[in-house]
Amino acid sequence: MSDSDGNISEDLEFDYDDDEEVSFSEFTADENEIDLVNKFEEEVYIKKDLKKEAPSANRLQARAKYKAWSLEEYINHFFISKCKKLQSMKLPNCDFDDILIMLHAKNWGEESVINGCYDNPTKFFEDCGLPLRKRNNTFEVVKNFLCPICCSDDDIQTETYSLTCNHKFCVACYTRYVVGLVHEGKLITCPECKLSIPHGDVQKFVNVYNEQQQSGSSVLNSPFKFVVDDASKAFVKGSPIKTTIDLSSFELLKYAAKRNIDSNPGNFKYCPAPDCMHLVELLSPAKDGRTESENGKTMDEENIYKVPIVTCPKSHEFCYSCQFENHLPLPCWLVKAWIKKCNDDSETANWIDAHTQSCPKCDSQIEKNGGCNHMTCSTCAYHFCWICLEEWAKHGHQYYACNRFDPDTVNAAQKYKKSKRLTLKRYIFFYSRFSVHETSMEGDSKTLKKVNEKMTKYMNEESKRRNNAEVSSTNSLSWIDVQFLHDAIRQLTNGRKTLKWTYVFAFYLSKSNFSEIFEQMQDYLNKTVEDLSKIFEEIYAKKKDSSNLIMQNKLDIINLSNLVAQRQEKMIEFAFTGLEQKLLRLEEEKPESSLEPVQTQTQGQTKRKQR
């Protein structure tokens, strides 16, 4: 969908039908099963009643207890709050900078810092890279200074920086040194000794580097203006960090948090969404009463009730276990199998296996593109018969009539080829539908974003008019009145995502009466999702008075979003039943006979005159 001109592209409508019909009708549901589907349809039907509340989040997605953190919240809670707590304890000879360095050096363990400060403070300070005397970090301009790193000895004045150890280096070299190490998340020490650079000083170097990058200047050639403003002067004089500064924005602390999180993957994980730096803490795994089979063995791998679906502060849903998007109704192991199948060359190999044969002499793959059965390998120049794979010279003078024909061998080979073609066609059938809904999700995302922008703009204008007394408060809309729109947007996204993964579930599902019911439920969910998506597209396509169209369709939007939520949940529950009954298969079995075979043209034997 193109949004450059503000109009909905006509190409947004997808054709879900293949060019060739594929039949799945070998199995038929009996009357009881049809009644079950009809009963399901009746249960999820929602009458047009504005008082009907939107359903809560899918109960299958709320079984894992977790806490969503922004990176700033994590730093403030696990780093800064500990530092302030220790500062309030009046540790001897320690200011805020010192305590922050101590905590960082001891992996943010409060007890380690307290014990170190009182048991053997001298050794503890040395281990943390802190000076035993008062800190004296200095910035000064030195004439005829020879930098030990870049060996620059120009007559001009050189800006230098040094810690209490008095190991001076030019600011350009110090900046490159700090920026090169900050991503490791560890304390950065003096290039020549083990004294630690305070976090505030590190951030100043990072800020200067970023400013140089934004201006397009080179770190090597551009002078550093540390002494221009008062803040820079305070920095180079070694002033302690003011607790009013937002320390969560410090790059070193961000990378330290990432290092801490990566070392503890069992409890914390980053949101996998692109450019999202938020994370989730798993407080307890998903639980459900049905965790044992009849023989007493656990079914954790098959129990989708135990899939820990979590949401980051930016409302990105993902699976905590495999860090993939919300993939219900599939368990994680099945998602991994599908991704592997789509990413590797298995289907390419299947196509080659189905449409080519190996040269009997050098094993090169050969595709037959003509009617003649006399084949010549382009690799080794070996002449052989396409039908029996014997050397062509053995065929005597009956040049185009294979007298080495073995009916059993040929029938087995043709049966194998047919099976491979059906397997390949079945994969393409389900993958195409999976891919279509993945593309539709992208289209929905653009549409919903524009609809949300229109509604936000309208509400802001409405608020201004209300403040200017242009409209009465009784006749204007509030944000509460349009909350249904955000709920519907979220539900459409979730419903489309579930629908997409149901095609993967169906791919691995053995053909049975259960699969027939599953496909009908899939049709119901698909229709409801498309109906809701169509309303949003109509709203997006309307250039004027789109907010009025939203309110006119409020009833339909609420009802359809409720229906999507209920059908989505019913389908996930039904999929769990299939997992319990072990109806899925991963082996490359013979495709179901209900699939219509690919129509292939048999190569007839062409009679030609002998030379």
Image (cartoon, rainbow, N blue to C red):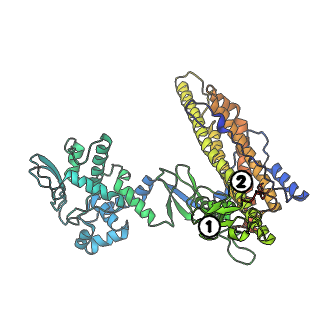
Q: Earlier in the sequence, mark 2 or mark 1?
A: 1
Which amino acid lies under the numbered mark 1 shown in the image of this protein?
A: Tyr
Please indicate, yes or no, whether residue 207 appears anywhere in the rendered image: yes
Q: Is residue 572 visible?
A: no
Q: Residues within 10 Å of mark 1 (few under 14, many from 20)?
A: some
- CB under 8 Å between discs 2 and 1: no
Compared to residue 217, the image places residue 364 above or below, namely below
Q: Tell whether 294 sits left or right of 377.
A: right
Report which quarter residue 477 is drawn in: top right
Q: Quadrant of the C terminus?
A: bottom right
What residue did someone put label 1 on?
A: 382
Q: Along the line of sight, which residue is nearer the eye, 340 or 159?
A: 340
Tell me the tag on residue 429: 2
Give the left or right position of residue 353, taking residue 403 as reference: left
Q: Which mark is nearer the camera, 2 or 1?
A: 1
Number of the label disc, if any, that sits on residue 217: none
Q: Position of residue 173 (x, y in %)?
A: 22, 54
Picture quarter containing residue 311? bottom right
Front in this rendered view, residue 473 or 218: 218
Helix, strand or loop status at disc 2 = helix
How far from the left and from the top, in percent, is residue 411? 79, 68
Count the numbered circles shown: 2
